[in-house]
Image: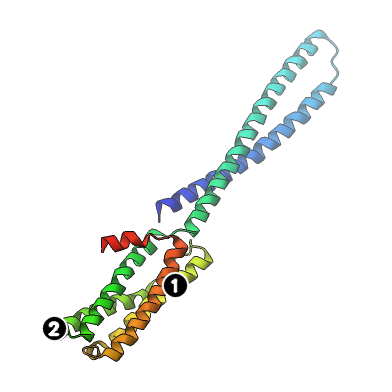
Amino acid sequence: MLDLEWIYIIALSLGILFVIGVCYFLFRFIFLGKKLKQLSKKRVKNKKQKREKKEEKKALTKKKHSILILFIVSLVSSILFFSGSAYIKYYQSMNLTQEDSKSIVSSYYLIRDFEDQLKLLRDKKDDQVKLEQNIRQLSTSMASYGTKKASTVNSVDGQLILNRYYNSVKQLGMNASTQTKNFYGNSELVNDFLKDIQGAKDYEGDVFRYYKVDKSVLIKAK
């Protein structure tokens, strides 16, 4: 579980605890108010009873004031913690999780390495056996994206965009794995795959725009 998810759970739990506190202190405040009202109506006959009544009333008033402060503190705290947990939830829904981030970075390089190897095969720029082995490895890695699903903490739109991209990477890998031996010197087949690669890049662009991924950082790292 991510650290941010732990913070969300803790903030939400504290918010719930403070809500319980709000209810408890509100009940106590009302109870003490009624008790003070009853005490004010109580008739006393002598000075001793009047003094005791005055002291009790003073103690109850002081306790009521303390309860009021605790009620306000609990109320403000519950609002703060619920607001904080809501913001964390929103932040999570609009940002890539650590696992999805790794998947995006990995697929970014996989697609471009795949594209480079296809061009070498098309133009017969390197040893055929070596290139076909590279394509086979890349195809397997891309096909594995069939097991990936966007984290459910993401927004519904974010999940849709990510899953569509993952599926396009998977399809590239699966299709390429059946054509490994046919790429060498085959311009028509390679060009068809280059079009599919562009389609995957378009979906990739949707992911980058939605999650505000800085593509320039990836380009520099490559």
- For discs 2 and 1, the disc positioned in front in the rendered view: 2
Residue 47, given in percent of the width and then of the height, sits at 81, 8
Q: Which image quarter: residue 147?
A: bottom left
Determine whether the residue tagged by mark 2 lies in a helix, strand or loop.
loop
Q: Which residue is mark 2?
A: 127
Left-right relation of 91 to 169:
right
Question: Quadrant location of the N terminus?
Answer: bottom left
Q: Is residue 89 left or right of residue 192?
A: right
- Where 85 sits versus 157, above or below? above
Residue drawn at (40%, 51%) of the image: 3
Which residue is pictured at 31% across the width and 67% down the height?
106
Percent across and percent down for residue 68 are 67, 30
Dot 2 amino acid type: Asp
Q: Would you say 112 lies left or right of 92 here?
A: left
Count of residue discs: 2
Q: Secondary structure at mark 1?
A: helix
Seen at 36% across and 66% down, the residue is 104
**Badge 2: residue crowd in 10 Å (few <14, some 14–19, many ≥20):** few
Give the vertical position of 44 relative to 174 (above or below).
Answer: above
Q: Which residue is mark 1?
A: 163
Colour mapping used in the image: rainbow
